[in-house]
Image: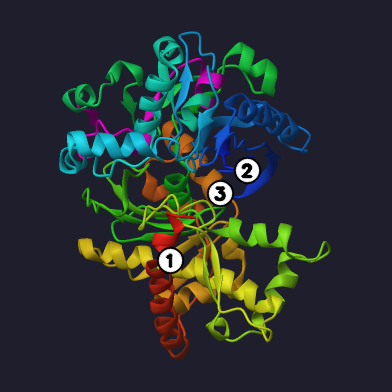
């Protein structure tokens, strides 16, 4: 009897593939890397076929684990990075690399369209500002810069829907990724044909939205041959990685909030209303009837990874760096770090923003820099939470996910900076678990998402804010905000 669930996560630097039992325990998992391409300044691309090849390798490797067999897989769920614009023809052939969420090539398009159509006209439908990172400006870029590709594009797909197509042969668009398409009505969950027309686009270029847990088809004979999966295994539509991670962290009720500690950073506040803010991100949750008010930052766990790869000694581990940071007092003796490693998303939306260390002097050590990196990421989280508070939402605690939540120090810094209690469930697998939970709901293993969360999520530790330290961080936070304000004009010049 099939009783296991397969989750697939299409990340920025690698895919994760994991098998779970119905209690949410990981039985087997693998990471398969793939490259990013930077053909021009501001351009960041990936080849969706390289995602697919990596996923095939990853799935095949699972069958080497004793007790794991294709016949045991009851369903497959897929999550993926946001704001792809993958042009595929009617046969499903990818026609061009996709600009990914970090790509800002369409910034001139975004500015022109906002001016011509009007911010409010777009925001009223989409609940999101018309910014170059999103899918819609990239579709217009293809239309203007590669009209032949645009003409031959049957559908623009998202990251998870592309892999779903490779597995099932079906082209779909899940609700949680709809927020990247500005003629998707964020409140009604349908396309606004009039706005699409005003944008010079057609709703025929994107698939109709479907619920994230809906089974869209079974694994094809061809995909079974490439992956070793059993032909006909049910595949759910899947959803946005941050939304699946939010579910996989146990957030499925209004007011609960996920804190993201993956490659990127940010937060997702669960609401039963489509509360929008022009400086934040609003999307449908993968759980029906709910939305996520999100802050998405470029600088998350990837900032410390960059530091380790470029500035640390070859034999230094993350634990070694953490021990150095632990020796430095809160506030890093005045060292501040702006984590804008590829421009910045919310809440400043500045593609020219640069990462900056401020306050370095001869008495500062590597530990000061490491702690400043951790604190800078925490300040960016607090910045988003402060903006979210303007909508009236109340966040009492954070549920952490991602590799950074494995660090007790980093989690404590975030608790102290935000003044919020942070709970940490099984963290490294939250995103793939969320994808697997969608499949479980789709095939009927879970009767609803409340049951899925209750059955699978276990909190491993809880960290409370230190009120004395929080006072130090409130002062440092003001310096963090002022530093950007003082430098932003220079960012646009140099």
- The numbered disc on residue 13 is 2
Say whether residue 208 is left or right of residue 459.
left
Q: Does residue 271 appear left or right of residue 118 in this picture?
A: right
Q: Residue furthest right?
A: 315
Disc 1 versus disc 2: nearer the observer: 1
In the picture of the structure, the residue carrying the numbered disc 3 is: 24
N-terminal of the two: label 1 or label 2? 2
Chain part drawn in magenta? 163-192
Left or right, residue 15 beside residue 250: right
Contact between marks 2 and 3 (CB within 8 A): the answer is no
Of badges 2 and 3, the one in the foreground is 2
Cα separation, mark 2 vs mark 3, equals: 24 Å
Say few, some or many: other residues with alpha carbon within 10 Å of mark 2 (under 14 / 14 to 19 / 20 or more): some
Q: Choose mark 3 or mark 1, whichever is in front.
A: 1
Kindly tell me whether residue 426 is visible in this rendering: no
Where disc 1 sits, the SS reads helix
- Local secondary structure at mark 2: loop
Percent across and percent down for residue 76 are: 54, 31
Q: Nearer the viewer, residue 263 or 211?
A: 263
Mark 1, Cα crowd under 10 Å, few <14 / some 14-19 / many 20+, is few
Q: Residue at (54%, 13%) from the top-left corner?
A: 93
Let me know if residue 15 is in the magenta part: no
Residue that carries the numbered disc 1 in the rendered image: 487
Q: Earlier in the sequence, mark 3 or mark 1?
A: 3
Residue occupying the point 43% across, 72% down: 483
Q: Quadrant of the N terminus?
A: top right
Q: Nearer the viewer, residue 285 or 115?
A: 115
CA gap between label 3 and label 1 equals 46 Å
Q: Is residue 171 above or below residue 11?
A: above
């Amino acid at each position: 009897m099939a009783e296991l669930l397969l989750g697939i996560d299409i990340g920025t630097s690698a895919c994760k593939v994991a098998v779970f039992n119905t209690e949410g325990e990981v039985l087997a998992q693998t990471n398969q890397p793939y490259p990013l391409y930077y053909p021009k300044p501001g351009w960041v691309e990936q080849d969706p076929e390289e995602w697919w090849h990596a996923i095939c390798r990853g799935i095949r490797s699972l069958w080497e684990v004793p007790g794991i067999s294709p016949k045991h897989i009851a369903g497959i769920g897929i999550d993926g990075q946001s704001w792809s614009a993958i042009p595929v023809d009617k046969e499903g052939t990818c026609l061009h690399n996709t600009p990914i969420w970090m790509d800002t090539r369409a910034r001139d398009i975004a500015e022109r369209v906002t001016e011509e159509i009007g911010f409010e006209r777009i925001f009223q439908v989409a609940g999101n500002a018309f910014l170059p990172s999103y899918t819609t400006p990239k579709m217009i870029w293809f239309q203007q810069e590669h009209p032949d590709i645009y003409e031959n594009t049957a559908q623009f797909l998202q990251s998870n829907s592309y892999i779903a197509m490779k597995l099932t042969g079906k082209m779909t668009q899940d609700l949680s990724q709809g927020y990247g398409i500005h003629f998707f009505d964020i409140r009604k969950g349908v396309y606004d044909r009039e706005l699409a027309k005003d944008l010079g686009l057609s709703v025929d270029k994107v698939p109709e939205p479907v619920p994230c847990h809906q089974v869209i088809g079974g694994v094809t004979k061809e995909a079974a041959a490439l992956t070793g999966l059993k032909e006909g295994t049910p595949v759910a539509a899947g959803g946005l990685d941050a939304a699946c991670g939010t579910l996989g962290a146990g957030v499925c009720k209004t007011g609960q909030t996920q804190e993201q500690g993956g490659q990127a950073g940010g937060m997702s506040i669960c609401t039963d209303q489509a509360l929008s803010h022009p400086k934040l991100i609003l999307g449908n949750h993968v759980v029906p009837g709910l939305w996520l008010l999100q802050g998405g930052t470029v600088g998350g766990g990837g900032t410390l990874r960059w530091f380790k790869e470029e500035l640390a000694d070859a034999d230094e581990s993350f634990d070694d760096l953490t021990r150095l940071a632990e020796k430095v007092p809160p506030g890093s003796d005045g060292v501040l770090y702006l984590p804008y490693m590829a421009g910045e998303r919310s809440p400043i939306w500045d593609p020219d923003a640069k990462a900056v260390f401020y306050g370095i002097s001869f008495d500062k050590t590597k530990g000061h820099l490491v702690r400043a990196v951790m604190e800078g990421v925490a300040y960016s989280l607090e910045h988003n939470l402060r903006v979210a508070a303007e909508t009236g939402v109340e966040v009492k605690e954070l549920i952490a996910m991602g590799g950074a939540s494995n660090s007790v120090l980093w989690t404590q810094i975030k608790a102290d900076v935000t003044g919020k209690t942070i709970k940490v469930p099984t963290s490294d697998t939250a995103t793939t678990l969320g994808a697997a939970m969608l499949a479980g709901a789709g095939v009927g293993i879970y009767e609803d998402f409340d049951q899925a969360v209750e059955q699978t999520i276990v909190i491993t530790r809880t960290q409370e804010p230190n009120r004395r330290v929080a006072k130090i961080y409130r002062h440092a936070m003001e310096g963090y905000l002022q530093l950007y304000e003082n430098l932003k004009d220079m960012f646009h010049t140099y």
